[in-house]
Image: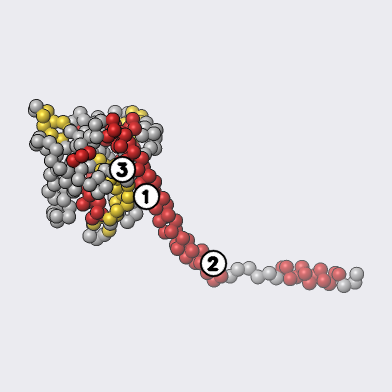
Amino acid sequence: MIGWPSKLKTAAKSRTTLRAFTLVELLTVLAIVGLLAAIGFPVLVKAKRNAQTTECLANMRQLGVAFRMYLDDYDEQFPAAVPWGIPGSPATHGQKTIQEILVPFVPGGMVSAKLPDGSRSYSKRSVFRCPSDVGLPKTFDGFGGGVKAGVPVWRQTGCSYEYYAANQRDYLGSAGENPPKVPRTALAPEVEINGERTRIGAPLGAVVSSARKALLGDIWFWHLGDYVMPENKVAYCNTLFADGHAARVRGVEHLEARLQQLERWHSYTELD
């Protein structure tokens, strides 16, 4: 019993003499934490973007099913639709957009609300929405019938995807800013009939190779790795093909699939 007080004093003294972290040690710990965060953050960002790419491809596959259902109902003819844009806008010339035509064939459809300025905002996420859609760059403000830059395209139009209805441009064969259009590449060309402009859907039988003909793709380069600087060449692009399969392909393959010409199937003069 006599020794207890001295032992208690020794223990109390040892507790009071515990050494705190020095400034150098604290900075070292913070540096290590910062280094780990710097290493881990890009990995997390890449994983998120890969997931968005996968979801986008899943959307395209469902849209491929919608196209197949449409073809079954309309004598194997592709939709006579506007490539993309705001439904009902003057830029559509009274023609329906691809999302308007396909909406009966997809689950969920599109939900929109009227804004004070008379435009509509689409709020319900669906297979028409690319998860990476953050809008067009500022240089494209007002491009495409009043679509605003910096605002997700799907919120303004109901759809993030472009239907290759019009004749496609040959970016590989021309280095200019406005390369020429390649004839007979359109799936729903705009033509003039009896003095009126209208669209006509191509028959599936006019497609030379449905597994290699691009049908639909993202309106812009929203996915990781889709744009390579400084050459400004597309590295990869999500693509829906005419046979219904969707894949992430190299930019060159994507463009070649868009440029695949159809067999001659009409005798009208194409306007676009």
Residue name at image x 26 percent, y 59 percent: 229
Q: Amino acid at mark 3?
A: Gly
Mark sitting earlier along the chain (1/3): 1
Look at the picture and state if 185 lies above or below 191.
below
Q: Which residue is mark 3?
A: 244
Mark sitting earlier along the chain (2/3): 2
Q: Which residue is mark 1?
A: 53
Q: Quadrant of residue 95?
A: top left
Q: Quadrant of residue 205?
A: top left
Residue name at image x 32 percent, y 47 percent: 246
Look at the picture and state if 181 lies above or below 9.
above
Q: Judging from the image, what secondary structure is the residue with disc 2 in?
A: helix
Residue 144 is at least partly visible in this image: no
Q: Amino acid at mark 1?
A: Thr
Locate residue 200, reporting x and y percent. 18, 33
- Quote the CA–CA distance across marks 1 and 2: 36 Å
Q: Quadrant of residue 268?
A: top left
Q: Quadrant of the C terminus?
A: top left
Q: Nearer the viewer, residue 261 or 132?
A: 261
Q: Is residue 14 left or right of residue 111?
A: right
Residue 15 is tagged as none
In the image, which is nearer the foreground, mark 1 or mark 3?
3
